[in-house]
């Protein structure tokens, strides 16, 4: 095992404590403190909108971090400098607890810092391995995810207590101290890391190959791919006109999705033309990345469901019966606790048992099952909402079952996806492809914003009420169906996907 791994793992544990420490109390803080001047009926909806907008930023900025690392600074220096931005964001949350502009500035800096380093730390772990010891990489990625949840567990359990007893300055300040510790620990390992130099002038980069594929014309050949990409740009611009209906962030993200989707499909249709000016390895690498992006797209419904445990599920828990000392946001501690139990259970019990039975439970099958588990969890949470809407009281302990189902889905999707994304990406595109993996979470939260915006329409709300369901219950069953449909498509696509091995020699 590479000796430098301990620095990265310790850094990740502290950083995840800091992130989940502030993230898991964010919705409660917004409802009970920052948004007190708003009408009570609007606070929960606005808090959910701010929360998912923040998460969109966290998982959008990996694109910036991956680009900086691959082109200019390298992974180590990008992580180090953006970690300092991250620390500044925590400081703003602690200082500006009663100032919306200052507090939102802190959220922006945390989104920039956390998002910028997010794809790089995971791929930096992969860089420490080669063909000789790559068999250890999966164990380290599982350990990596285990330490994430170790930090998340204590943050989820303790920060609501600190928020109630000592106020927002302390509750947001402690995660800031942990982030500073994470930065120092990462810096201490600088002499031991394997550092792959950035490809500042790579003529065969992903973007250049795609550009060539779209722009090179061949006599007698149609330019359907280019026309499709151009149409995507026009539709993307049209999405910007929806700002008044769905908000600035949602319209920008929707435009990005349309441009990426149409541009990627257009490049795929004309990719062979790029062989005229690029190496076969580069063109084959881009084709592999484009196929991988379809996998990422099919994972986005899972993130729609998963991230709402820190918003929609907390709002539901607020309406359930519980002990006076227990706070709704503390239910989220159940998720990392279950992750820490399920990772060793899967690795030492479930997966070996399936192998002995002759069942090949590869990465794609695990991810497809994980998406389905999330859908089932939301069916359960929706049934609970129906009971509550009918006037019956439910204890918050009923949420244990959907948390268990959702967490099993998370273990199957997220831990598997980290290692899978790294292993499938060509060597020169590791940072960018990990950024796209994180972008899938941004798009997942975009679906949440669009769903929330749609139910603000009076006509649609009236139709939902005619079904006999509350808007909340209807949305829960909608997201459940969304995930189960994605799981079916994922299973079909996975059967035709050729898995590669792109660890460095």
Image (cartoon, rainbow, N blue to C red):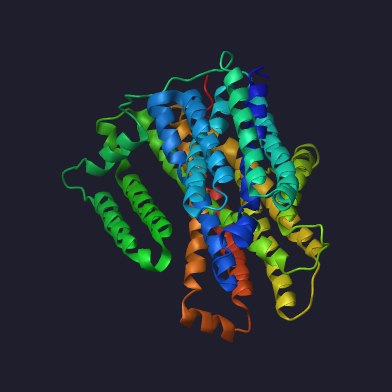
Q: Residue at x 74, y 55 (%)?
A: 331
Residue 128 coordinates in the image, percent (x, y) = 58, 21
Please give left or right for residue 52 compared with residue 250 in the image: right
Residue 283 coordinates in the image, percent (x, y) = 35, 34
Please give left or right for residue 394 compared with residue 236 in the image: right
Q: Residue at x 17, y 47 (%)?
A: 220
Closest to the observer, 19 or 445: 19
Residue 130 in view (yes/no): no
Quarter-wise, where is residue 29 in the image? bottom right
Q: Residue furthest bottom?
A: 466
Closest to the observer, 215 or 310: 310
Q: From what the image shows, is residue 76 above or below residue 353?
A: above
Residue 494 coordinates in the image, percent (x, y) = 55, 48
Please give left or right for residue 75 compared with residue 321 in the image: left
Closest to the observer, 19 or 240: 19
Residue 290 coordinates in the image, percent (x, y) = 42, 43
Q: Residue furthest right?
A: 323
Q: From what the image shows, is residue 117 above or below residue 366?
A: above
Q: Residue at x 55, y 66 (%)?
A: 37
Residue 52 in view (yes/no): yes
Closest to the observer, 501 or 179: 179
Please give left or right for residue 157 compared with residue 182 in the image: right
* Quadrant (top left, top right, bottom left, bottom right) of the N terminus: top right
Q: From what the image shows, is residue 505 above or below residue 90?
A: above
Q: Residue at x 67, y 28 (%)?
A: 10
**How many numbered circles does the render carry?**
0
Q: Residue furthest top?
A: 191
């Amino acid at each position: 095992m590479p000796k430098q791994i301990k620095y990265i793992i310790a850094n990740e544990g502290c950083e995840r404590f800091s992130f989940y420490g502030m993230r898991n109390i964010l919705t409660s803080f917004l409802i009970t403190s920052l948004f007190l001047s708003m009408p009570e009926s609007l606070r929960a909806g606005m808090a959910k909108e701010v929360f998912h907008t923040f998460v969109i930023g966290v998982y959008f900025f990996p694109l910036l971090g991956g680009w900086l690392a691959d082109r200019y600074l390298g992974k180590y220096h990008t992580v180090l400098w953006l970690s300092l931005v991250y620390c500044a964001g925590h400081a703003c949350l602690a200082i500006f607890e009663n100032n919306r502009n200052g507090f939102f500035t802190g959220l922006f800096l945390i989104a920039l810092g956390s998002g910028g380093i997010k794809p790089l730390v995971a791929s930096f772990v992969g860089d420490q391995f080669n063909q000789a010891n790559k068999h250890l990489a999966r164990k380290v990625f599982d350990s990596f995810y285990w330490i994430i949840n170790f930090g998340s567990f204590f943050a989820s359990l303790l920060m609501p207590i600190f928020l109630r007893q000592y106020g927002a300055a302390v509750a947001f300040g402690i995660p800031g101290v942990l982030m500073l510790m994470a930065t120092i620990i990462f810096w201490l390992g600088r002499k031991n890391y394997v550092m792959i130099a950035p490809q500042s002038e790579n003529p065969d980069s992903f973007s250049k190959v795609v550009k060539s594929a779209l722009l090179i014309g061949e006599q007698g050949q149609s330019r359907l791919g280019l026309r499709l990409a151009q149409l995507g740009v026009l539709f993307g611009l049209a999405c910007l006109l929806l700002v008044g209906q769905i908000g600035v962030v949602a319209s920008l993200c929707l435009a990005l999705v349309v441009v990426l989707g149409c541009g990627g499909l257009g490049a795929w249709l004309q990719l062979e033309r790029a062989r005229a000016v690029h190496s076969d390895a580069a063109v084959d690498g881009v084709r592999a990345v484009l196929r991988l992006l379809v996998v990422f797209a099919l994972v986005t419904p899972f993130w729609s469901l998963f991230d709402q445990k820190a918003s929609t599920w907390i709002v539901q828990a607020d309406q359930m019966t519980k002990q006076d000392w227990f706070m709704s946001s503390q239910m989220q501690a159940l998720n990392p606790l279950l992750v820490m139990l399920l990772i060793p259970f899967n690795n030492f019990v479930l997966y070996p048992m399936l192998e002995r039975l002759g069942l090949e439970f590869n990465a794609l099958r695990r991810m497809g099952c994980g998406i389905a588990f999330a859908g089932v969890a939301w069916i359960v949470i929706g049934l609970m909402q129906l009971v509550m809407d009918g006037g019956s009281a439910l204890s918050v302990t009923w949420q244990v079952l959907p948390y268990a189902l959702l967490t099993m889905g998370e273990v199957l999707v997220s831990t598997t996806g980290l290692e899978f994304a790294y292993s499938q990406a060509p060597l020169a595109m590791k940072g960018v492809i990990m950024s796209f993996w994180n972008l899938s979470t941004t798009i997942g939260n975009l679906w949440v914003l669009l769903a929330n915006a749609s139910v603000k329409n009076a006509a649609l709300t009236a139709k939902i009420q005619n079904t006999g369901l509350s808007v909340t219950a209807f949305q829960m069953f909608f997201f459940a169906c969304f995930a189960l449909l994605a799981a079916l498509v994922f299973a079909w696509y996975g059967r035709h996907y050729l898995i590669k091995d792109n660890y460095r020699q």
